[in-house]
């Protein structure tokens, strides 16, 4: 039989169960047969004793029966294979006895039984015969004219039971052997059937590990494997999606890097070759500097993404005043705010609002959101930043007036390298990673961020933070 490892393991498990069952059945059969044979032997022996007594009593009343008493007794005893018999008078003296009665009556239990029989009791006991069976002994008083004139004590040999028992055990062994052979085939079939879904799962795992993420396990599997196969398929689908995302990510990076490099190379080559007029060199060098800044920003944001997605980058919680941090971020954009003549409002319920978070991470969130607000607000428009308490959390909102974002675009703004058509013209240096980084930082904190927009009116980002808490490890700002 050609079996793989799984089948062999299941087959061994089933066979161990089969062997246990077969042995148990055979042992139980042996004990049941022994019990039934002993009971049957006792019943037959008791009938024999009754026959002996009735024959002896008849001999007392009939002279002809007295002459054939011995022959009648021999015939009765030969029917059951009795090995020992003793008939005694009311004083316990043997009157009729088998050949080995002297050894027989010398036993303590036999002498005590004779005394009890003379006293009018019926006795039953067993004497050891061999390692499997015991001799069965039974005795009754002989009553004639309501007077106990003696008694009978006889024993049926264990060999009588042993011969039958051996025959039964032979049949039981044969039955066990046939059952064992049948169970081998059943165990083989069960092992093959049970190992099939496991083998399918193993094959799928091998293909996935080799890079084939389109292999799925059929969901018709039953029992625990149904859940396992469903989880595996979900995992394979997730990996396939992640693989596709990684390919798109690499493609986007390549595009984002290739474009500025092409521009930089072309402009510098033109300046070196002298094809660029002297009066335009300054303009071209400005473009080169802008593209260099774009590349630098791309590299920095990629490093930030790697850092955020690394398991070795835990959130370092500390208590600090979120209102104070917002003021510091606004100051960073003071020049751009003045250039666009923007109206900036910072609304807060409390002058000091303590939160528990990673200060550097939240500063990056506020910087990215404020940067977007400054970029996409129209000249003379407004920017509103607010902090309010809601349900035990602090809600921070950053809103700006402007063209806004369509509902279709709102579902994609958190994706890597996603830029709306309007942002492509308004943000020449952006690469579409800012909001993706914001989302990751907020997720790391176990908090939530949402985006709302009414096209032609405003765009608002709202995220939550936990209020100040007692920290075992951390610095309180």
Image (spheres, helix red, strand yellow):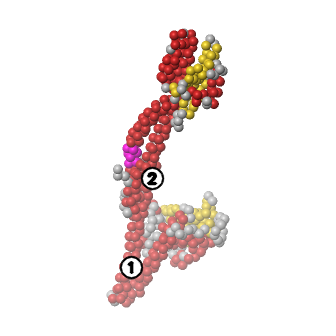
Q: Secondary structure at mark 2?
A: helix
> Of residues 44 and 224, which is closer to you in this image?
44
Question: Picture coordinates of residue 54 (x, y %)?
Answer: 55, 15
Q: Quadrant of residue 60?
A: top right
Q: Residue at x 39, y 81 (%)?
A: 264
> Of residues 39 and 164, which is closer to you in this image?
164
Q: Residue at x 43, y 59 (%)?
A: 238
Question: Picture coordinates of residue 297 (x, y %)?
Answer: 47, 76
Mark before the other along the chain sequence, 1 or 2: 2
- Segment colored magenta: 183-192
Circles 1 and 2: CB atoms closer than 8 Å: no
Q: Is residue 73 above or below residue 219?
A: above
Magenta stretch: helix, strand or loop mostly? helix
Tell me, for residue 374, which label it has, or none: none
Q: Residue at x 65, y 20 (%)?
A: 91
Q: Quadrant of residue 90?
A: top right
Tell me, for residue 261, which label it has, or none: 1
Question: Picture coordinates of residue 68 (x, y %)?
Answer: 50, 14
Q: Residues within 10 Å of mark 2 (few under 14, many from 20)?
A: some
Q: Is residue 272 above or below residue 211?
A: below
Tell me, for residue 228, which label it has, or none: 2
Residue 185 in the magenta stretch? The answer is yes
Q: Secondary structure at mark 1?
A: helix
Q: Is residue 93 above or below residue 349?
A: above
Residue 380 in the magenta stretch? The answer is no
């Amino acid at each position: 039989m050609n079996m793989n490892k799984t089948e062999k393991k299941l087959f061994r498990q089933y066979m161990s169960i089969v062997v246990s069952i077969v042995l148990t059945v055979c042992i139980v059969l042996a004990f049941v047969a022994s019990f039934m044979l002993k009971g049957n032997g006792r019943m037959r022996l008791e009938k024999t004793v009754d026959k002996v007594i009735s024959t002896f009593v008849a001999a007392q009343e009939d002279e002809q029966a007295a002459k054939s008493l011995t022959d009648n007794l021999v015939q009765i005893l030969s029917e059951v294979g009795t090995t020992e018999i003793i008939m005694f008078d009311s004083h316990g003296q043997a009157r009729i006895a088998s050949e080995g009665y002297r050894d027989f009556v010398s036993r303590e239990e036999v002498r005590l039984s004779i005394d009890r029989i003379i006293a009018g009791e019926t006795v039953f006991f067993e004497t050891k015969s061999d390692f499997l069976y015991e001799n069965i002994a039974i005795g009754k008083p002989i009553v004639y004219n309501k007077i106990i004139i003696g008694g009978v004590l006889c024993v049926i040999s264990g060999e009588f039971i042993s011969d039958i028992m051996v025959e039964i055990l032979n049949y039981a062994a044969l039955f066990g052997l046939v059952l064992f052979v049948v169970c081998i085939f059943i165990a083989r079939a069960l092992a093959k059937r049970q190992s099939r879904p496991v083998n399918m799962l193993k094959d799928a795992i091998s293909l996935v590990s080799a890079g084939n993420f389109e292999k799925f396990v059929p969901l018709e599997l039953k029992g625990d494997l149904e859940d396992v196969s469903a989880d595996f398929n979900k995992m394979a689908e997730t990996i396939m999606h992640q693989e596709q995302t990684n390919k798109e990510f690499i493609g986007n990076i390549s595009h984002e890097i290739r474009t500025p490099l092409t521009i930089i190379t072309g402009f510098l080559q033109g300046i070196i070759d002298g094809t660029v007029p002297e009066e335009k060199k300054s303009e071209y060098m400005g473009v080169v500097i802008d593209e260099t800044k774009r590349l630098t920003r791309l590299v920095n944001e990629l490093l930030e993404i790697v850092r955020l997605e690394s398991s070795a980058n835990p959130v370092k919680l500390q208590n600090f005043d979120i209102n104070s941090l917002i003021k510091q971020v606004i100051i960073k954009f003071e020049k751009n705010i003045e250039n666009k003549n923007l109206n900036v409002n910072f609304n807060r319920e409390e002058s000091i609002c303590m939160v528990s978070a990673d200060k550097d991470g939240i500063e990056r969130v506020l910087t990215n959101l404020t940067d977007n607000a400054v970029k996409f607000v129209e000249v003379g428009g407004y920017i509103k930043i607010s902090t309010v308490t809601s349900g035990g959390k602090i809600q921070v909102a950053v809103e700006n007036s402007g063209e806004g974002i369509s509902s279709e675009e709102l579902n994609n703004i958190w994706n890597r390298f996603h830029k709306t058509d309007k942002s492509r013209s308004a943000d020449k240096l952006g690469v579409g990673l800012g909001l993706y980084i914001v989302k990751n930082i907020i997720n790391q904190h176990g908090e939530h961020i949402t985006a709302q927009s009414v096209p032609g009116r405003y765009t608002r980002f709202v995220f939550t933070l936990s209020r100040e808490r007692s920290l075992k490890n951390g610095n309180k700002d």
